Image (cartoon, helix red, strand yellow):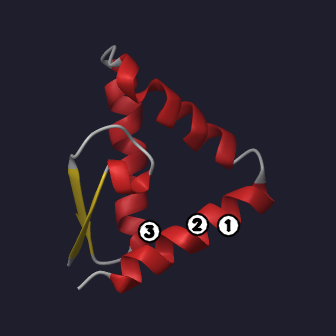
């Protein structure tokens, strides 16, 4: 199990997401951003918008996804 923070994934805080794979932490980050924005946390709005925008631009999203997977793999 590895840990990445919200800020390592492009967000504004140090909340830790744990998972067996990069996909696990990415999904946790997506949930975290949605929940934070729903709760009125404006500091997470830009990261939430970026997350939504990534999936509208698949080529750019794949670059972010590959970089995130690489960073996850490099964690000890």
Name the residue that disc number 1 marks. Answer: 63
Please state the horizontal and vertical placement of residue 54, each as a whole percent of the image.
Answer: 66, 48
Q: Residue at x 36, y 66 (%)?
A: 24
- Element type at mark 1: helix
Q: Residue at x 39, y 29 (%)?
A: 44
The structure residue drawn at horizontal position 38% and vertical position 76%, both measured from the top left corner, is 72
Q: Are marks 2 and 1 in contact (CB under 8 Å)?
A: yes
Q: In the image, is residue 18 above or below residue 1?
A: above
Q: How packed is label 2: few (under 14 Cα within 10 Å), some, or many (20 or more)?
A: some
Residue at 57%, 31% in the rendered image: 49
Which residue in the structure is indicated by mark 2? Answer: 65
For residue 35, above or below residue 50: above
In the displayed structure, does residue 40 sit left or right of residue 61?
Answer: left
Q: Which residue is mark 3?
A: 23
Q: CA distance from mark 3 to mark 2?
A: 9 Å
Q: Quadrant of the N terminus?
A: bottom left
Report how far apart the C-alphas of labels 3 and 1 lie in the structure.
Answer: 14 Å
Query: Distance between the Cα atoms at labels 2 and 1?
Result: 5 Å
Residue 19 placement (x, y as % from top left): 27, 70
Q: Give percent across and percent down for residue 30.
A: 43, 46
Q: Residues within 10 Å of mark 1 (few under 14, many from 20)?
A: few
Does residue 50 appear left or right of residue 21 in this picture? right
């Amino acid at each position: 199990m590895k840990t990445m923070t919200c800020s390592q994934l492009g967000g504004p805080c140090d909340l830790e997401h744990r998972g067996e794979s990069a996909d696990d932490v990415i999904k946790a980050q997506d949930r975290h951003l949605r929940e934070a924005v729903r709760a009125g946390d404006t500091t997470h709005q830009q990261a939430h918008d970026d997350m939504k925008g990534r999936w509208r631009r698949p080529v750019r999203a794949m670059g972010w996804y590959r970089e995130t997977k690489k960073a996850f793999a490099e964690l000890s």
